[in-house]
Amino acid sequence: MTYLMCIFMVGLVLGVVVVASNPSPYFGALGLVVVAGMGCGVLMGHGAPFLSLVLFLIYLGGMLVVFAYSAALAAEPYPEALGSRSVAVSAAGYLVCVVIGASLLLEGGFRGLWVTADELVEFSLIRADMGGAAMLYSCGGLLLVLGGWALLITLFVVLEVCRGSSRGALRAV
């Protein structure tokens, strides 16, 4: 389990570096999807599988809207890829900063870092995220429906803004 969590954490850091190095919006959106997947894997490994699933679905819904908007407005014939020189230099700089920060902050090692929420209480009858899911549907059901409705309206607004005056991405921004 520790190896799997290390893979998730390395993938999370690499995805954040891809997003921060600011390539073309296509690759930036791909980096955000990787960050969402790896972050939800970390949550799942720490004992919150339902929270991880809900977060992943909601985040990917929002990313669909952002990707549609950015892909429609940034119609580049030759987008800057992840292997180009400027992106590679900035990504290497960010990785050096991550390594230096990790070496300064984690001098004592990983003591108690991989303890899941279910292992904190000796005789727990309910998983840690199941209580939150019950509260989400009992007290927060209306907020959940309103959030889904807001995402749907946002999708239509973004698609309408991208369409412009019937020219799509060819219009002057």
Image (spheres, grey):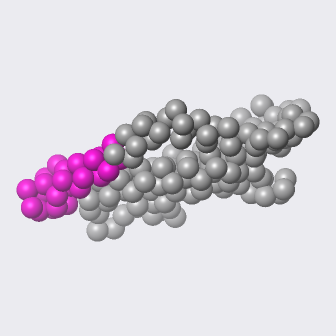
Asked if residue 100 can be seen in this view, the reply is no
Q: Is residue 50 left or right of residue 121?
A: left
**Residue that lies at the very extreme toward the front in this rendered image:** 138
Residue shown at 51% from the left, 54% from the top: 57
Q: Main secondary structure of the magenta part?
A: helix
Residue shown at 78% from the left, 58% from the top: 4
Point out the stretch of residues depicted in magenta.
150-173
Q: Nearer the viewer, residue 84 or 2?
A: 2
Residue shown at 49% from the left, 35% from the top: 140
Q: Nearer the viewer, residue 32 or 92?
A: 32
User: In the image, is residue 24 above or below residue 110?
Assistant: below
Residue shown at 81% from the left, 34% from the top: 106
Asked if residue 169 can be seen in this view, the reply is yes
Residue 148: x and y, percent? 39, 46
Q: Is residue 160 left or right of residue 52?
A: left
Q: Is residue 159 left or right of residue 166?
A: right
Q: Nearer the viewer, residue 171 or 3?
A: 3
Tell me how many marks there are: 0
Q: For the N terminus, give its image quadrant.
A: bottom right
Residue 58: x and y, percent? 48, 49
Residue 168: x and y, percent? 16, 61
**Residue that lies at the very extreme toward the left in this rendered image:** 165
Residue 39 belongs to the span the image colors magenta: no
Residue 69: x and y, percent? 30, 54
Residue 171 belongs to the span the image colors magenta: yes
